[in-house]
Amino acid sequence: MKLPIYLDNHATTPLDPRVLDAMLPYFKESFGNAASRNHAFGWVAEEAVEKSRKQIADLIGASPKEIIFTSGATESNNLAIKGVVEMYAERGNHIITAATEHKAVLDTCKRLEKEGVRITYLPLKGDGLVDLDMLREAITDQTILVSLMYANNETGVIQPIAEIGKICKEKGILFHTDAVQAVGKIPVNVIQDNIDLLSLSGHKIYGPKGIGALYVRRRNPRVQLTAQIDGGGHERGMRSGTLNVPGIVGLGEACAIAKAEMEEETARLLALRERLKSKLEGALEETYINGSMEHRLPGNLNMSFAYVEGESLLMGINDVAVSSGSACTSATLEPSYVLKALGLGDDLAHTSIRFGIGRFNTQEEIDYTADKVISVVNKLRELSPLWEMFKDGVDLSKVQWTAH
Amino acid sequence: MAYSSKVVDHYENPRNVGSLDKNDPSVGTGMVGAPECGDVMKLQIRVNPETQVIEDAKFKTFGCGSAIASSSLATEWLKGKTVDQALDIKNTDIVNELALPPVKIHCSVLAEDAIKAAIGDYKKKTGAEEATPSSVTA
């Protein structure tokens, strides 16, 4: 077993060697510009791009013409939301999203808010799921877009996307989903789920960084977007710029592998996740799972270890790469806004760890991680005045703390 | 962000972890911070009533590595000092010793507060001074 162990697969994933092999020729001899229509170099590149478009479309139940290549999901989210707001300005100026969205959606909405667009940020239920009744109530005759993520990057909680899509369809409102964490991990189908716009990214599914895509529905309804980058009119005029052919080939190959191996991989990840969870819960008291366990990505475990601050825990398990919702690990000194939106107190948010298990993790790595976390949590609890007070039966919520 | 070797050393081998009997009249207890803020320090001193010398110091800290290191270092510095000398320990001394980055300066401030709170509690017990407002009552 090699150290350090990578268990942060929601942040990014290692490139699958098969993906790299597919990409390499397009860095070398097949370097052509896919927009060159009059010679073989261009044709070879274009053919590779179209193959990738089909591989991506096949994974999400779309048609190849509905796939627009971008630099990544941040750009896809920007293009989807800003593009709809500009294109459909005459129809209304209200967007519904949620408090736990990725910053690429939230900050895009905040900018639009300054420009006069009305945004509703739905609160979440304690298990991290959207309340469908609240969604229905939030819809007005001015609502043009609902943007809700498929699965959350911190808690792995999967939203009831098909129900949300159905509501939007009934009301004639466009539905965008940031599906970066879901595509390639769980079955996604834009037809069944009534999705109009869907963002996805290469590097979250063992593909390369710097490449993503936006699915834009072409019929029933035909969705139009105002381009955010002007230029040569590539990608049906929605996203100009010379295509990143090696990246596109990599994204396509990553999608093909994900589709072929999803069932097997899901079973394997679930087994590893359950092994980690039961080891930790078996050895440690006062642990809490954040978000719904039932509606969760197979590779995700988000757990709070009460009375142990997250950054100090990360420091103790420094040969295992994970993330924490603790304020100390962020630049803002604010604990995770996602966990806070689930109603988690700041005290528990500070003690949370996100484990992201991926394709290349082994059972040996999971066992090593569990043992390490258990020993460091025990050590830090011996150091924790809160643990001592808890053991003495002090009700910590009744203590008059000195906030600073 | 990389930690300084001194922070790592105090984190790996924290000095003077533990608790003293808070009802002992020669023991002063300071507890500062809040779980919601991500750090709580408990610092205790045992003072020789004849000499006013701090003969023992213990801590427990819930917080990041820098917070643990700051309080661990504080207990090392407190031992052997008189109560009045201990009041001269400044958070900037801790920042310099541990090479704390700007984002971790609040950890050193908390350690200084904990020292002052522990001394305040001791002085209150001996009738020398009113309690400082920063001491926590559980």
Image (cartoon, coloured by chain):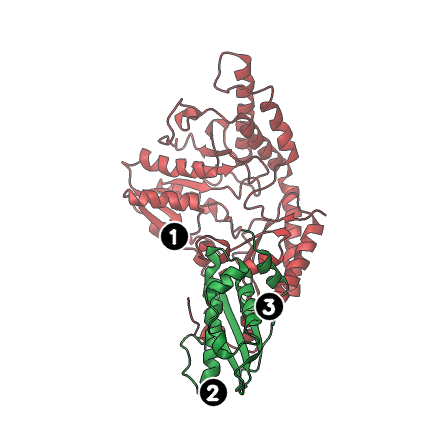
- Camera-side mark, 2 or 1: 2
Chain B, chosen colour in render:
green
Q: Which one is in front, A80 or B52?
A: B52
Residue to which mark 1 is pinned: A122
* Picture coordinates of residue A114, whole percent (x, y): 29, 45
Instruction: Give the chain letter at badge 3.
Output: A
Residue type at mark 1 is: Leu
Q: Residues within 10 Å of mark 2 (few under 14, many from 20)?
A: some
Residue visible at 66% across and 46% down in the picture? A361
Location of mark 3 (residue): A381
Kindly identify which residue carries mark 2.
Answer: B126
Spot occupied by residue A137 in the image (x, y as percentages of width and height): 34, 52
- Seen at 37% across and 27% down, the residue is A230
Q: In what element is the residue under mark 3? A: helix
Q: Is residue B13 above or below residue A217?
A: below
Q: Is residue A96 visible?
A: yes
Q: Considering the numbered disc 2 on the image, is that residue within a helix, a strand or a loop?
A: loop
Q: As shown in the figure, which amino acid type bears the numbered disc 2?
A: Thr
| Amino acid at dot 3 | Arg
> How far from the left and from the top, in percent, is residue A326?
50, 58
Which quadrant of the figure has residue A109?
top left
In the depicted structure, whether residue A12 falls above or below residue A214: below
Q: Nearer the viewer, residue A126 or A205?
A: A205
Q: Earlier in the sequence, mark 1 or mark 3?
A: 1
Distance from disc 2 to disc 3, alpha carbons, whole Å, reads: 32 Å
Spatial separation of the CA atoms under disc 2 and disc 1: 56 Å
Q: Foreground residue, A90 or B68? A: B68
> Are circles 2 and 3 on residues that touch, CB within 8 Å?
no
Chain red in the figure, letter = A
Subunit of label 2: B
Seen in the image, is A4 located left or right of residue A196? right
Work out whether disc 2 and disc 1 sit on a shared chain: no
